[in-house]
Amino acid sequence: MNRRKSYAVGYIRVSTDEQAKEGISLADQEARLTAYCQAKEWELVRIYRDEGESGKSLDRPGIQKLISDLKANGIDVVVTVKLDRLTRSVRDLGTLIEDLFDGCALASVEESLDSSTANGRMVINLLGTVAQWEREIVSERTTAALRFKQEQGFRVGRPPYGFKVEKGKLVEYAEEMKNIVAMKRAHRRGQALRTLGRKYGLAHSTVAKLVKTDLRLLRKQAQAKKIAKPSEEQE
């Protein structure tokens, strides 16, 4: 007796600061999903993608399109390379598995997990809980370190787009300043923020702020800030 073929869809994501990291590119994730589904003898119907999008929330066009399409029958499993590609929130992970995927299993290539089994669901939730705990610990330590620097009178965090730190001073970054001018011009001509974000490797929310920025005011604000030493800026 022939068994029924299983149908799968894939999901891949990169955030802006991850695009250059080895093994995290969209092309790499797509290749791994394809190979995994072939090994499982699942028919991969479609791969949904989000480029330059954070995993902190589900407010992403790719994941929302996936959720919407799953309302139609026929898909058995959603496959992702790693759980944090899908979401970095334990709450959102639970919502996806229990509600939004509506009976579809979730499989993770790297963690070798499948939520169609009770053990798989338990391990997925445990991994998500541990991952969130680790992020919160790192966040608490980072917040404490930044607060100390602020108390010393230093500016903390990355320099604003259009500037860089040289010898402890904030100076204009000519290439990025040109990009801001180009983005402003393109946006006035009707180019979408997300299109500009993909072109310049920025989140669309960052582009939205930059196209509204008064460069004279930006320069004035930057000159008024005290900057940490370059070694401190990299910590």
Image (cartoon, rainbow, N blue to C red):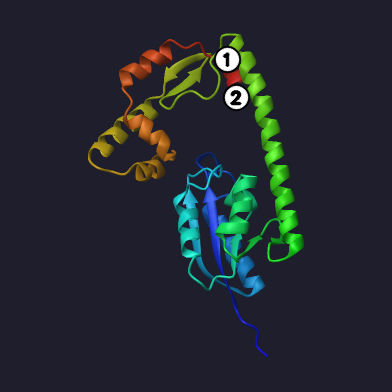
Q: For mark 1, what is the residue? A: 229
Is mark 1 in CB contact (under 8 Å) with mark 2? no
- 179, above or below 194, in the image: above
Quarter placement of the N terminus = bottom right
Q: Is residue 132 left or right of residue 73?
A: right
Q: Residue at x 41, y 24 (%)?
A: 173
Helix, strand or loop status at disc 1: loop
Q: For mark 2, what is the residue? A: 234
Q: CA distance from mark 1 to mark 2?
A: 9 Å
Q: Residue at x 61, y 19 (%)?
A: 146
Q: Residue at x 57, y 15 (%)?
A: 229
Q: Residue at x 74, y 49 (%)?
A: 126
Quarter placement of the C terminus = top right
Q: Amino acid at mark 2?
A: Gln
Find the residue positioned furthest to the bottom.
Answer: 1
Pick whichever, 125 or 182, lies toward us: 125
